[in-house]
């Protein structure tokens, strides 16, 4: 039986094509399986994809791919995207429940395993993942209505559904009953494909978005939602709290070896000789090496650790000193011969003319050193490379299919040979979004060499020296004013090593193929100041520092709110300086430069919550000397992925010691419809902690040859005591779809804090982190 | 060289074979298959590996297993039993009751990635055993200044942790007052 759902409705022809097929009857149970159909014209890529589907992808002709409605009324959703810690697993369940008119508790999720999930896609790409999930559920809902209409012999228009029970014409039937005893297969349309290595192109992997569900099935209007907009508990939390969660660090396999890596002495060292193992002391430990990749393995983890320390002490590496030293980063970036910007936005001629004609101009340079993701748990992975060439990897990567593509490329193999299994682990904050970085390639190489499953656990020092980093940058901005102090033109130039190099260190050190990215930069700001008529943004990129080494040097990678975090800091810094130059209240100054109603609303709401009294900065009591605290306040805004953010910082500075204390932070966020108010509030608060950490403390330091900030005493992050009182101002609206609500809160903190610093001291701080030593130097100038 | 060591972990006697200097975390995780304590810094700088040793928080990444012999080791897996014993709960009640700290961590939806949270809950249990009604300042002080290091959370869940500690305190005090 084939039911075409677009013919099920007499009133309209729906602009999508799905097919619902009855494959047969089953004795027990029964289910509706939702899989996908590639569109016409997808043939070339489909053939290849179909080949992979036969081996370790789900085969949509045989098995459910995406969603299953089962006869016991439970629902199973499979998605290649994962939980990164900000609550997506809850949001996905809410979206499905909303479109299917069921309770979210009835839904279970399988996430991230490449052999159990069909779609791929990076976990950070929540908005596209959300759109997919909603459409899958919405198509399924239409198919279920069609089934119910046939079963109950009532017109489809007369049906309504509550908690998975379809009612119409005095009759009722559960979803489970509709599928009972049957194997139904619903095919829905998609575009896209699976992630594949693409050396030299963008980040080095294509198909990062995975599959995209196409068409336009009817979906619940956001103002009629019953599940989205409620604080459904994020799944998985009780297990994390009670110790039931199986983390990726918990994976053990029969015959598995524990490995500790012995890394080069410097970022550019090559191996001279490996130290010896004292077999009396370490009877089960073995050295494994390939190129500059050296490890010690043992079935006993402590023996692997102890032996690796002994071997490391006797291992010789060449000297190398090709880094400028972190204290010289800005100078190095300034001295670099930048070519034309790889990316620009705006009208160059108009901006040049407007700046030339301005009544007054101001300009400033902002900068930040290298910072890093710095999870609490260092990278860990388990790999099992079997003699037939098949590979299984257990990971916490935020992009399972991207990782699979990179491993396949490294091995000269095909993605079909590789299965990536995802498990919870320490947050990654962007560094695994492109499927790279991490311990997975170390584990694969060692497993291939030893013929046994291998678990690689990095140490904190190793993670802080060898994982990718968010690069240092400098930005020059110039603004022109008219006679009323209104900005007429703005030109920003942003310079940075590129932040799209997620090549795994294991593959690099072993000298195996790595799918390299394309160095460059991108304009990341989203513009809210529509009354500034003329603007121009130039973004310049350069290779990694130390790029010529075998390790790739300081591999730049994206980190939470990438690009925009940095570029918006410079932009908002200048807007605050411009407000001060115009002798205008900084909130009023922002309002004067926008007609964006959404920004105006959240800015006013946040200002009100803060008890903001209009006045210009600096404060009348501002001072740059003294041993007693002086107060200041500052504001910043940001638009990112359809979400508007406002940060207001209230700080005290002790000028003589340079110690800054953030006493209160008020954060406003309007991400369109808020899916889960409680979790949104939690993410706002935690984002403020991360943002203040960056504003006040974080800096990757390095000498001429290696990273030196390799533990928590040297790479300092915000502690609980340093966290201010945080007040949240969440604003939900039903008419603007969904925005990125998990990420972004961090990025409004640094410019709000530096603005508050100016308010307190009358001195502009154009560099973060505002450490006591930097602050005292700044105030003594 | 490996020795036979007898440990008491979550109330049960366990005989393990390990070199005495092996950090406790590797014995708990690899021999006893407890995933609550997780390896973070490996040098007592972050707190993600914490357990209770006779009711006091220790960092298992630097504590030799031999040091735990003869003492009571409690991981988050064992917290419900600790609470059940303290409250003299029936077996039926104990089976469905979490430690109030764990319940508060769920109710306040504290974990994001959750990696550090075992250590955070261990620190909370210890704090509440000594300071049943901590102020926000006392909570911040305990999680920041108690040696050997602050408890670090990179996801930034500190505000939720404070709320959860205060919620747990309320639940534990109510229960204690209600006891005959």
Image (cartoon, coloured by chain):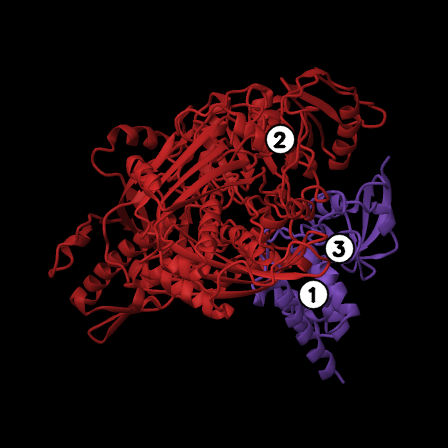
Chain colours: A red, B purple
Left-right relation of B135 to A140: right
Residue underneath mark 2: A328
Q: Look at the numbered disc 2 and give the secondary structure of its residue.
A: helix
Q: Is residue B123 visible?
A: no
Q: Does A247 sit above or below residue A445?
A: below
Which quarter shows the C terminus of chain A?
top right
Say which mark, if any, is on residue B51. 3
Residue B121: percent from the left, percent from the top? 68, 60
In this rendering, do the residues under marks 1 and 2 share a single chain?
A: no
Closer to us: mark 1 or mark 2?
Answer: 2
* Chain of residue at mark 2: A
Residue A154: percent from the left, percent from the top? 17, 68
Count of picture labels: 3
Residue A464: percent from the left, percent from the top? 65, 37
* Chain of residue at mark 3: B
In front of the other: A477 or A401: A477
In three-dimensional space, the C-alpha distance between marks 1 and 2, rounded to whole angstroms, equals: 53 Å
Residue A188: percent from the left, percent from the top? 26, 47
In this rendering, do the residues under marks 3 and 2 share a single chain?
A: no
Q: Does B178 sit above or below residue A112?
A: below
- What residue is shown at x 36% (from left), y 53% (from top)? A486
Residue found farthest to the bottom: B180
Closer to us: mark 3 or mark 2?
Answer: 2
> Which numbered disc, 1 or 3, marks the residue that appears first in the sequence?
3
Q: Look at the numbered disc 3 and give the secondary structure of its residue.
A: strand
Left-right relation of B104 to A50: right
Residue underneath mark 1: B80
In three-dimensional space, the C-alpha distance between marks 1 and 3, rounded to whole angstroms, equals: 14 Å
């Amino acid at each position: 039986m084939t039911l075409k759902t677009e013919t099920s409705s007499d009133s309209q022809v729906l602009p999508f094509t799905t097919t619902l097929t009855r494959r047969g009857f089953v004795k027990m149970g029964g289910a509706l399986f939702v899989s996908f159909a590639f569109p016409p014209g997808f043939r070339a890529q489909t053939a290849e994809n179909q080949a992979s589907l036969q081996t370790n992808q789900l085969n949509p002709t045989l098995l459910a791919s995406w969603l299953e409605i089962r006869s016991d009324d439970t629902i199973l959703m499979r998605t290649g995207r994962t939980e990164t810690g900000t609550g997506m697993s809850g949001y996905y369940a809410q979206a499905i429940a909303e479109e299917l008119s069921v309770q979210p508790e009835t839904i279970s999720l399988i996430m991230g395993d490449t052999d159990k999930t069909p779609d791929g896609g990076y976990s950070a790409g929540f908005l596209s993942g959300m759109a997919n999930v909603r459409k899958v559920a919405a198509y399924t809902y239409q198919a279920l209505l069609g089934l119910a209409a046939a079963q109950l012999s009532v017109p489809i228009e007369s049906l309504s559904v509550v908690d998975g029970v379809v009612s119409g014409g005095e009759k009722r039937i559960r979803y489970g009953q509709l599928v009972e005893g049957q194997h139904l297969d619903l095919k829905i349309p998609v575009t896209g494909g699976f992630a594949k290595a693409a050396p030299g192109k963008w980040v080095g992997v294509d198909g990062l978005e995975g599959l995209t569900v196409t068409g336009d099935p009817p979906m619940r209007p956001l103002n009629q939602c019953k599940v989205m907009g409620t604080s459904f508990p994020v799944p998985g939390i009780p297990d994390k709290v009670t110790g039931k969660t199986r983390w990726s660090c918990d994976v053990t396999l029969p015959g598995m070896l524990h490995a500790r890596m012995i890394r080069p002495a410097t970022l550019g060292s090559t191996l001279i000789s490996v130290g010896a193992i004292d077999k009396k002391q370490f009877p089960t430990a073995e050295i494994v090496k390939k190129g500059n990749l050296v490890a010690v393995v043992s079935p006993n983890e402590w023996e692997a650790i102890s032996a690796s320390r002994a071997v490391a002490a006797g291992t010789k590496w060449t000297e190398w000193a090709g880094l400028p030293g972190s204290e010289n980063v800005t100078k190095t970036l300034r001295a670099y011969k930048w070519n034309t910007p790889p990316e620009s936005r705006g009208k160059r001629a108009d901006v040049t003319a407007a700046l030339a004609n301005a009544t007054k101009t101001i300009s400033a340079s902002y900068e930040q050193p290298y910072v890093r993701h710095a999870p609490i748990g260092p990278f860990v992975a388990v790999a099992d490379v079997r003699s037939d060439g098949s590979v299984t990897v257990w990971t916490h990567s935020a992009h399972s299919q991207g990782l699979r593509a990179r491993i396949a490329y490294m091995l000269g193999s095909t993605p079909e040979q590789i299965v990536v299994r995802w498990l919870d682990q320490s947050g990654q904050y962007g560094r695994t979004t492109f499927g790279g970085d991490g311990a997975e390639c170390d584990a694969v190489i060692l497993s291939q060499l030893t013929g046994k499953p291998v678990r690689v656990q990095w140490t904190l020092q190793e993670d802080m020296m060898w994982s990718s980093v968010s690069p240092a940058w400098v930005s020059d901005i110039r603004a022109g004013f008219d006679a009323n102090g209104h900005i007429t033109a703005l030109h920003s130039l942003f310079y940075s090593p590129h932040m799209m190099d997620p090549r795994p260190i294991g593959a690099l050190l072993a000298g195996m193929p790595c799918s390299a990215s394309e160095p460059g930069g991108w304009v990341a700001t989203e513009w809210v100041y529509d009354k500034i008529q003329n603007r121009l943004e130039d973004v310049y990129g350069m290779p990694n520092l130390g790029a010529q080494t075998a390790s790739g040097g300081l591999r730049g990678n994206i980190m939470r709110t990438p690009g925009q975090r940095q570029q918006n800091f410079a932009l908002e810094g200048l807007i605050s300086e411009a407000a001060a130059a115009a002798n205008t209240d900084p909130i009023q100054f922002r309002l004067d430069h926008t007609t964006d109603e959404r920004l105006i609303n959240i800015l006013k709401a946040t200002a009100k919550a803060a008890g903001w009294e209009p006045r210009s900065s600096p404060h009348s009591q501002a001072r740059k000397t003294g041993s007693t605290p002086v107060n200041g306040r500052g504001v910043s805004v940001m638009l990112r992925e359809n979400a508007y953010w406002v940060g207001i910082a209230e700080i005290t500075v002790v000028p003589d010691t340079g110690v800054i204390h953030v006493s209160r932070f008020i954060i406003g966020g309007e991400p369109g419809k808020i899916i889960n108010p409680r979790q949104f509030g939690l993410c706002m608060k935690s984002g403020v902690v991360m943002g203040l950490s960056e504003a006040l403390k974080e800096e990757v330091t390095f000498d001429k040859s290696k990273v030196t900030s390799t533990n928590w005493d040297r790479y300092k992050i915000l502690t609980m005591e340093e966290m201010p009182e945080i007040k949240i101002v969440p604003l939900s609206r039903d008419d603007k779809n969904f925005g990125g609500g998990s990420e972004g809160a961090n990025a409004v903190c640094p410019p709000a804090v530096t603005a508050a610093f100016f308010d307190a001291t009358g001195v502009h701080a154009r560099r973060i982190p505002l450490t006591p030593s930097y602050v005292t130097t700044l105030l003594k100038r | 060289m490996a020795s036979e060591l007898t440990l008491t972990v979550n109330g049960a006697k366990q005989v393990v074979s390990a070199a005495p200097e092996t950090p406790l975390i590797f014995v708990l995780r690899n021999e006893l298959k407890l995933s609550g304590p997780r390896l973070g810094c490996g040098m007592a700088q972050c707190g993600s590996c914490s357990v209770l040793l006779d009711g006091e928080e220790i960092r298992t990444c630097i504590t030799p297993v031999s040091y735990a012999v003869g003492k009571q080791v409690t991981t988050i897996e064992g917290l419900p039993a600790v609470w059940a014993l303290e409250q003299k709960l029936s077996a039926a009640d104990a089976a469905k009751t979490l430690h109030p700290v764990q319940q508060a961590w769920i109710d306040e939806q504290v974990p994001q990635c959750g990696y550090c949270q075992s250590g955070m809950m261990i620190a909370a249990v210890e704090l509440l055993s000594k300071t049943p009604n901590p102020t926000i300042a006392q909570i911040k002080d305990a999680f920041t200044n108690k040696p050997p290091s602050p408890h670090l959370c990179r996801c930034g869940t500190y505000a939720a942790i404070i709320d959860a500690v205060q919620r747990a305190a309320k639940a534990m005090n109510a229960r204690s007052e209600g006891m005959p």
